[in-house]
Amino acid sequence: MKIAVVGAAGRMGQMLVRRIAATEGVSLAAASEQPGSAALGRDAGEVAGLDACGVKIVGDSAAAIAAANVVIDFTIPEATVAHARVAAEKGVSMVIGTTGLDPVQTGLIHDAAKKVPIMWAANMALGVNVLMALVEKTAALLDPSYDIEVLEMHHRHKIDAPSGTALALGRSAAAGRKVELEKVWRRSRDGHTGARPTGEIGFATLRGGEEVGFHTVYFASPGERLELTHRAFSREGYAMGAVTAAKWLEGKKPGLYGMKDVLGL
C-alpha cells in the first residue's frame, strides 16, 4: 500500500514517516508541506531522523495525494477540508486525525466520504478508544445523579479547546445516557455560573509545556468519585493507529468510519 503524508515536516508528520518505514506492507509514496516551508525539497526520511528514503517533500499536496492509495492528514481544519476534496476527486482513501473542524467543515468531510472511504477519529490511540468504550458503558450504568466532568491537558502549542478527544469522550458519556451532547454540555466555566445542573457534562482545559495528551473523565456523586484516565507519553500511539487505519481502509466502500470500526469495538 502506498501512503502519502501531508504536513510531513510537523511533529506528527515526522512520526508518521517513521511509523510507515517500520511497518510491513506499506510504503511512503509522497510527502507534502505548506508552501514556504523550510522542509520543501528535503528528503522526508531525513527530516524524520531516518536515512534518506528517496521521497522529497513537495509543496503540491494534490500531486502528493494523487500518488498514493491513501493519504494521512494531521494538519489544520482548512487544509484537511481541501485535502479531502482532492482525495475524493482522485479516488484516494483518507485517514484524518485533525480536530477542531466547525459544522460546515465537518459537512464537507461527510460529502467527501460519499465518494471514498474516510477514517476520521479525534484520537487514534488504542487506549483512548478503549477509554471511550468504558466511558459510554459507565455512563449507562450510573444514574444521572453522578456528575460527569472531562478534564484534558495538552502542550502549549495546541490551538483548539476542548480537545477533539475530550469532546469525543463527552460524546461517549452522552451516548451512554442516551442524550445529545450539545444539549447538556458546558464547554467552559467562568465567573458566577450558579449551581451545576443535574445531567450536565462539563469540560475543563489545561495548556502547558509539552504534554502530549492527558484526559480524565470524572463520575462524581456526593459519596464517591470514579475517575477514568488516559495519558499519552508520545505520539507513537497516534501514528501506529493511523497507519493501522490506513491498512484497514484497503478495499472498503466509500463511507465515514471511526477507530471503533478499525478495532472492532
Image (cartoon, rainbow, N blue to C red):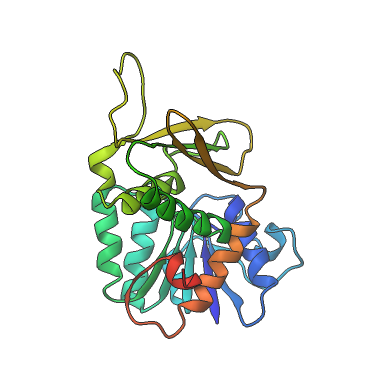
Q: Residue furthest toward the right? A: 51
Name the residue rendered at 56%, 33% in the picture.
156
Q: Residue 177, relative to residue 188: is it above or below?
A: below
Residue 110 image position (x, y, % from top left):
27, 64
Residue 153 image position (x, y, % from top left):
54, 36
Relative placement, left or right, of 171 versus 215 is left
Relative placement, left or right, of 97 versus 53 is left
Q: Residue furthest toward the front? A: 223
Quadrant in which the N terminus appears: bottom right
Observer able to see residue 67: no
Residue 251 image position (x, y, % from top left):
43, 86
Observer able to see residue 48: yes
Relative placement, left or right, of 142 versus 72 is left
Q: Residue 220, relative to residue 107: is it above or below?
A: above
Name the residue rendered at 53%, 77% in the picture.
247
Name the residue rendered at 65%, 58% in the picture.
236
Residue 242 image position (x, y, % from top left):
54, 65
> Quick one: 91 or 140, which is closer to the camera?
140
> Quick one: 129 or 157, which is closer to the camera?
129
